[in-house]
Image: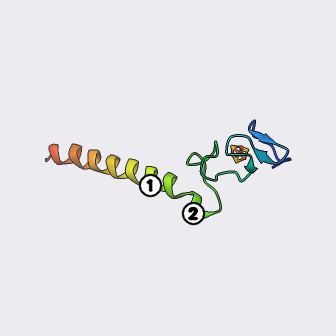
Amino acid sequence: MAGGGWSCPHEVDGRCSKVNNLPCDPGMKGCELYGRYTFFDGSKNDRLLQKQARAKAQKAESDCGEKADTDD
Ligand code: SF4
């Protein structure tokens, strides 16, 4: 992945020194970026979406709890 505004410190000649020297595929499992960023390839977003859904659910829960207490 040469070019663009970002280059991965693990990438060496297009291969990932972090993931068994496989061809660099940003967001693949084991990649530095896996689970941290949103990718166009939806299969790579599962973990991120789960995380966001959980955070949302927790927030909704605490919001409801607060409202339930103030009943006037
Ligand atoms: S796969 Fe990920 S960690 Fe590996 S070189 Fe590419 S961007 Fe870096």
Residue at the spot of label 2: 43
Name the spot of residue 23 as percent of width and height, x first. 76, 52
**Dividing the image into four equal quarters, which quarter contains ligand 1?**
top right
Q: Residue at x 64, y 56 (%)?
A: 39
Q: Secondary structure at mark 2?
A: helix
Say what amino acid the circle numbered 2 marks.
Ser
**For marks 1 and 2 on the same chain, the one whose residue lies earlier in the sequence:** 2
- Vertical side of 9 occupied by 1: above or below: below
Residue at the spot of label 1: 50
Q: CA distance from mark 1 to mark 2?
A: 12 Å
Name the spot of residue 47 as percent of width and height, x first. 49, 53
Q: Nearer the viewer, residue 51 or 64?
A: 51
Quick one: label 1, few (<14), some, or many (20+) residues within 10 Å? few
Q: Residue at x 41, y 54 (%)?
A: 53
- Vertical side of 9 occupied by 59: above or below: below
* Residues under numbered marks 1 and 2 in contact, where contact means CB atoms less than 8 Å apart: no
Q: Secondary structure at mark 1?
A: helix
